[in-house]
Amino acid sequence: MKLTAVHTHVFKENADLPLFIKDYIPSLEENTVLAVASKLVCLWLGLSVPYQNAAQKEALIKKESSAALKTPLAWLTIKAGMVMTNAGVDESNAQGKLLLLPKDCYRAAADLRARLQTVYGIKNLGVLITDSMILPLRAGVVAGAVGYAGFKGVRDLRGKPDIYGKKLAVTLVNAADSLASAAALCMGEADEQTPLCVIEQAPVTFSDEINPREISYPVQDDLYTPLFRAAGLISQGEKND
């Protein structure tokens, strides 16, 4: 697998994102996945509000999430079936504004993919919208896929044998988040100005039909559910968004 981060100038709000991408990536081959920082998508769709004060930001975080728990470092929230900090509300590199994630990041990824398919004249193209994530009890940030289109985000290995012939009972491979984190390692988190990453030879299955529910794990079966319930982040009997 080959990952190539792409340096760009600063993307302006409401600018044409597909044309911006084309300016910096003149051509894309079939069977490529393009990782795009969520901030670009937020700006493309005009999803910003002027920052006023901490109380305003806190109110937005609560509004944007289905569950929110205040911690010493940030709000631990659930948005669109994902655990993330501050419901994706971001003020870094935003010039005095707060950026909000799209209501439907999968639709945003699909719309961007359709435009890019036309721009590049290719069929098998994956679009991956990435955002920073924090793993429990791990220092530093990784990245997750807040939305994707054009490829299957999960590989189901249940029923397949391991090297000793034992059939796997529960193993699912999260390809979307794995690709997002690999791309983010190349893209950076500070002033690199590399919000795009071309991923070639990714071990994914390209598909026009994407079901966002494939990557959403049932609350009742999730490993962290007892911890979230104990902390009051989710309630007994709560289901995925």
Image: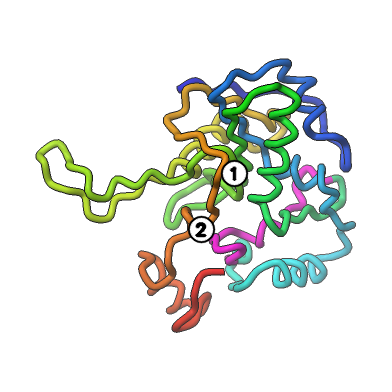
Q: Position of residue 178 (x, y in %)?
A: 46, 40
Residues under labels 1 and 2: Cα distance? 12 Å
Residue at 61%, 34% in the rendered image? 35
Q: Secondary structure at mark 1?
A: strand
| Magenta span contains residue 91 | yes
Q: Residues within 10 Å of mark 2 (few under 14, many from 20)?
A: few
Determine which residue is flagged by label 1: 148
Up/down of 170 relative to 55, above or below: above
Residue 22 lies in quadrant:
top right
Mark seen at residue 213: 2
Residue 64 lies in quadrant:
bottom right
Image quarter (top left, top right, bottom left or bottom right) of the C terminus: bottom right
Q: Is 46 positioned to the left or the right of 5 in the image?
A: right
Q: Position of residue 24 (x, y in %)?
A: 75, 20
- What's the amino acid at mark 2? Arg
Residue at 36%, 68% in the rendered image? 221
Image quarter (top left, top right, bottom left or bottom right) of the N terminus: top left
- Give the residues in magenta: 76-94
Up/down of 124 relative to 92, above or below: above
